[in-house]
Image (cartoon, grey):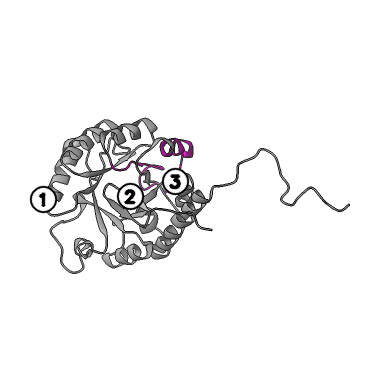
Amino acid sequence: MSVPDPGLRIGPREFRSRLFVGTGKYASVEQTEQALVASGAEVVTVALRRVDLKQRGEGSLMGLLASGRWTVLPNTAGCYTADEAVRTLRLARELGIAELVKLEVIGDPGTLYPDNEQTLEAARILIKEGFTVLPYCGDDPIVCRKLEDAGCAAVMPLAAPIGSGLGIQNSYKLEQIVAQAKVPVIVDAGVGTASDVAVAMELGCDGVLLNTAIAHAKHPVLMAEAMKEAVVAGRKAFLAGRMPKRLSAHASSPTTGVIE
């Protein structure tokens, strides 16, 4: 028996893969390509302020992404104000990068937690200018609701601090966000291994975005494969519906009709 799964729709686009992956921190462009292919991801994100957008020759990261094999999700990593983020994405649009964008406005350089006020301000401006905005935000149901109300096409709450690999630190808050959201919920930041991905999907999240967990694995390509499989397994478990949790034991075999 199969349960229908319509796929992931973000704004006007629909994707089969629910795994989004980053392109930073790899040992080489060749390794980046191998990991992207192994992950099965259709959407890959790139930090606009940390790459040369005009360098698109053979062997360059932008040359790889310009191949058309993936939907490129430009992000504003490194921006600390709404103005910086908006200007960065306007520049990217002038260079022909798509309207689908990941908005990231950092509030603290130590924790890399988002600045909720500046993120919301930037989101409102970008949405008015026709961008399809996916904002990185804290695992705060109120902030997520405000971003959705502003017109964001998805919300991207963190699991843990960026690059920490700590995994989901507050599953209850993620469940609250999923329960109220009318747009996709994509866990972004803090994932460390495949089990973290599976948990996020089992909670009902619509997707997971990660980078360091693959790029800093001992074998990045193998970890990319594991992340791909974890997304599929977690999504199937969510659709299947887990058994209820109980505070006492219940025999697995029937207790009636037992021959004494």
Q: CA distance from mark 1 to mark 2?
A: 26 Å
Residue 68 on image: x %, y %: 22, 63
Question: Relative to 89, is 138 on the left or the right?
Answer: right
Residue at point 83%, 51% (across, down): 258
197 and 24: which is toward the camera: 197
**Residue occupied by mark 3:** 166
Residue farthest to the right, as pictured: 260
**Residue occupied by mark 1:** 94
- The answer to whether one can see residue 35 in this image is yes
> Hey, what amino acid is under mark 1?
Glu
**Residue occupied by mark 2:** 9
First in residue order: circle 2 vs circle 3: 2
142 and 111: which is toward the camera: 142
Q: CA distance from mark 3 to mark 1?
A: 37 Å
Quadrant including the N terminus? bottom right
Residue at point 41%, 37% (across, down): 177
Q: Which residues are magenta?
A: 153-178
The 10 Å Cα crowd at callout 3, few under 14, some 14 to 19, many 20 or more, is some
